[in-house]
Image (spheres, rainbow, N blue to C red):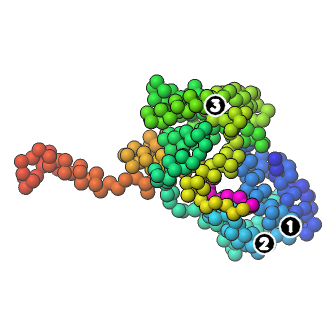
Amino acid sequence: MWELHFVSRGVAGEQGLSPVVDLVSGEKWLTTQTTDLTTRESVVSQLRGHAIPYLGSRPLGSFKPEHIRDWLSELERTVPASSYRRVIYNSVSTVFNAAVDDTHLTKNPCHARSVRPPEPGKGRIVPWTGERTFAVRSALPECYRAVVDLGGGCGLRQGEIFGLPDDEIKFHSGWLHIAYQVKVANGRLVFGPPKCNKVRDVPLPDRVAHVLKRHRETVPPVEVTLPWLRPDGPLVTMRLLFTRPDGNGAVRRTDFNTHVWKSALVAAGVIPEPEPGKRHQAAREHGMHALRHFYASVLLDAGENIKALSTYLGHTDPGFTLRVYTHLMPSSDSRTRKAVDSMYAGTDSLSDGPQTAQGL
């Protein structure tokens, strides 16, 4: 894994300082930013894929705002989602902040007035339709079709689906107990708690329960042993519903997304077929997280309250859930009309007014 620290101790602004690529060769910087290995992996992936190829060979002391502007222009061409470009930009800017703090630079070139950061992304979530959701489900191999039911019918995250043990499905009571996920730490698959440690119980609808029972019959659960939280953590064994196609080990998210999920998106007409010899196009808005958005839209349309939805999704703050999904909540005007009209029910004449409203 790339870890970040500054390997040169020259004077800030010296042209001879090591290039930016050398900033990603040790552990010191990144470990001061976060102790979560998955977060570190994400930052490393961002820098490796979208910053180092364009900025990595330039000596630290030679950076000017124009280099950041040129890089952002290239980033806009290669990364369509403004929100993700902002995440990448923030990671790069944080690296330069640390370089300034450690006197390797006098100024952060990302902070120049002429540098316009990518927009953080204000677009509203557009949930999948039921037709699209089930089209993708049908396009998946049979052994993975139930992931759509768990994501779209119970709101589970991808890692929670791949880390769902068979004995945490409570068919008799109609609940799923979400206490684990499969994630990557230092390039290795590990078991860990759900995001933000939000262990929770989620309602198990009858139709989803039926799908899971049938899945267990056709694809029996497999015992998988992984370390807990870290590659050197204690080993934990669970009987998982989903494993690699050969049944040997847990599902690695990146492999699944590249070889299984995106192929299903193509078959369902969600994204185009890649050109010969090229990869599928980036489709962050159509990743498995789209199933959670679909789940949220279904529950809100049915009148479920934000607090309950937030709990089922494993969010730490109902306010966050409200901000993300408020535009999906049904309009209240029809409910207002029905509520007032109901006061008139049972009265002899509309002109007399509602008896229950007297004195208001």
Answer left or right for 284 relative to 305.
right
Residue highlighted by disc 1: 58
Labelled pair 3, 1 in contact (Cβ < 8 Å): no
Label 2 secondary element: helix
Residue shown at 76% from the left, 75% from the top = 66
Crowding at mark 1 (Cα within 10 Å: few <14, some 14-19, many 20+): some
Label 3 secondary element: strand
Chain part drawn in magenta: 277-287
Residue shown at 69% from the left, 63% from the top = 275
Picture quadrant where residue 228 is located: top right
Amino acid type for the residue under numbered disc 2:
His
Q: Which mark is residue 358?
A: none
- Is 105 or 255 nearer to us in this picture? 255
In the rendered image, residue 284 lying in the magenta stretch gets the answer yes
Disc 3 or 1, which lies upstream in sequence?
1
Residue highlighted by disc 3: 240
Residue highlighted by disc 2: 67
Residue 237 appears at what percent x and percent y?
Answer: 69, 26
Label 1 secondary element: loop
Say which of marks 2 and 3 sits in front: 3
Say which of marks 3 and 1 sits in front: 3
Picture quadrant where residue 120 is located: bottom right
Answer left or right for 335 relative to 171.
left
Disc 2 or 1, which lies upstream in sequence?
1
